[in-house]
Image (tube, rainbow, N blue to C red):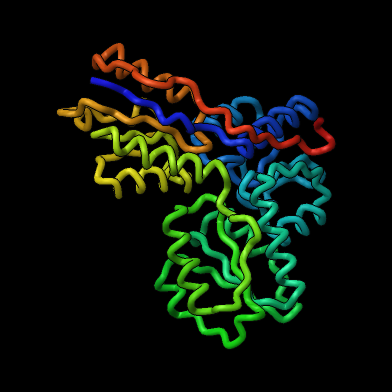
Amino acid sequence: MEIKLANTRGFCAGVDRAIEIVKKVIEIHGAPVYVKHEVVHNKTVVEELKNLGAVFVEDIESIPEGEVVIYSAHGISKAVEIESSHRGLDVFDATCPLVSKVHAEVITYAKMGFDCLLIGHKNHPEVEGTMGQFDDSYGGSITLVEDISDAEKLEFSDSANMAFVTQTTLSVDDTKEIKDYLLNKFPHIKGPKKDDICYATQNRQDAIKQLSLESDLVLVIGSENSSNSNRLKELAERSGVEAYLIDTIDDLSLDCLKGKSKIGLTSGASAPEHLVTEVIEKLTNIHGFKLVGVKDRTDEGISFRLPKGLR
């Protein structure tokens, strides 16, 4: 009975940066430090930061005036920026630079008076932040497109003044299907010069496709509210493999191991590596599985600098 690890897994550069920002700010300013939304979507990481003195809030209005606030890696809307200014908050921005890239695209299209389409998932904080960056005072609009059905309902007469952007953590395959449909329906629509789906999302999805071919069970370590982790589970299932999303070792059901001889193991971009280690230890020490193949994560060669005030 074997365990095989995805060689590309776990923390991405944006998550590494966001967590380090929270820790640095707490170190410099002392606790408590307020964080707008969960800085990354992982329960274990959030609990660890709470223990250091981070206070996670959904509404800027609930933060006392003049306090320190950190924006999560998912990004925020213009309205949040304005409210932070009104309350005199000391702001540190942990928005992933790849999300900031999408924000810049949306702001540019708004100033051009374009109608912009955002491919993404409703109510996801990244989507809310990106849509909230669009200024419709220039005459354009922004519309969320979740699937082909949404795309079919779109009615715009001038595709030369249209553009699309995407959430960074989507399924590459699903997004391509929607993009192809939009390009066919609106021949002159403009898109990003470089794909908005981030390198980490794409690398982890490529890795799990291969892992699924070599496994009869796939375990994805990640939280339920993690978009990229859910996409990994879905991709494994589409490959015809039984797959489960687990937050920690405590969520691993022994029933799912019955009759399985090859377990594929990976983790989402916001899941810490020590959770992977804990799952491996339980499977090997208690259930007799053996870890085979590559154990170390592939160095993706990407890193992001901290904000100027924290370097």
* Whole-percent x, y for residue 212 in the image: 31, 38
- Answer with left or right where residue 12 lies relative to residue 121: right
**Residue at 71 percent of width and 75 percent of height:** 136
Q: Residue furthest bottom?
A: 157
* Whole-percent x, y for residue 97 in the image: 69, 46
Q: Which residue lies furthest to the top in this view?
A: 285
Using the rendered view, name the quadrant where residue 162 is placed.
bottom right
**Residue at 77 percent of width and 52 percent of height:** 84
Using the rendered view, name the quadrant where residue 13 is placed.
top right
- Answer with left or right where residue 3 lies relative to residue 6: left
Query: Compared to 173, does 56 lie above or below?
Result: above
Q: Quadrant of the N terminus?
A: top left
**Residue at 66 percent of width and 41 percent of height:** 35
Using the rendered view, name the quadrant where residue 141 is placed.
bottom right
Query: Compared to 60, does 141 lie above or below?
Result: below
187 or 96: nearer the viewer: 187
Query: Total marks drawn?
Result: 0
* Whole-percent x, y for residue 98 in the image: 65, 48
302 or 133: nearer the viewer: 302
239 or 257: nearer the viewer: 239
Q: Quadrant of the C terminus?
A: top right
* Whole-percent x, y for residue 78 in the image: 73, 61
57 or 229: nearer the viewer: 229
**Residue at 65 percent of width and 60 percent of height:** 193
- Answer with left or right where residue 231 lies relative to residue 261: right
